Amino acid sequence: MIVGLLGLFDLHVAVLLCALGLGVEISVSVIIATAILLFAKACISLTDIGGLQDVAAVILILLGIFIVIPQWLLFIAAAIIGFKGLSSLAA
């Protein structure tokens, strides 16, 4: 059950990364709250590849506030996080 909820949160992060890539106006408070929650989720399992992917996504999200990140990089990160979320939902 908890793995499914974490998978839903990964899908939320994937949608957020896609929205950042498309230039959608998102509240900074939503972006920061998502980054904080994703970092807390990454700290649960920092030793495996999933936790490292979450940390990389946090870095991209926070950098996206200050600089323009290439669209292709955000879409690739969204696909990776999205696939991880879908596999967590299937588990």
Image (cartoon, rainbow, N blue to C red):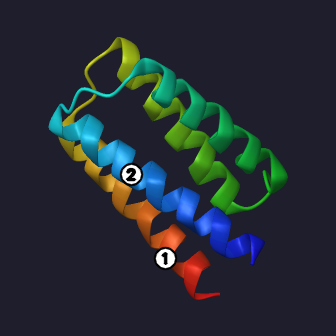
Name the N-terminal-most of marks 1 and 2: 2
To which quarter of the image does residue 34 belong?
top right
SS at circle 2: helix
- Give x and y (percent) for residue 29: 50, 21
In the image, residue 81 sits, relative to residue 18, either above or below, namely: below
Residue type at the position of mark 2: Ala
- Give x and y (percent) for residue 26: 32, 28
**In the rendered image, which quarter contains the N terminus?**
bottom right
Tell me: 54 left or right of 47.
left
**Label 2 Cα crowd, 10 Å radius (few <14 / some 14-19 / many 20+):** many
Tell me: 20 left or right of 71.
right
Residue at image position (59%, 30%) is 33
What numbered label is drawn on residue 86? 1
Closest to the observer: 90 or 79?
A: 90
To which quarter of the image does residue 32 belong?
top right
**Label 1 Cα crowd, 10 Å radius (few <14 / some 14-19 / many 20+):** some
Tell me: 51 left or right of 76.
right
Residue type at the position of mark 1: Leu
Instruction: From the image, tell me which residue sits under label 2.
Output: 77
Residue at image position (71%, 73%) is 3
Closest to the observer: 56 or 90?
A: 90
Task: Measure how far apart labels 1 and 2 are at the Cα level.
Answer: 14 Å
**In the rendered image, which quarter contains the C terminus?**
bottom right
- Give x and y (percent) for residue 37: 67, 40
To which quarter of the image does residue 56 belong?
top right
Residue at image position (56%, 57%) is 9
SS at circle 1: helix
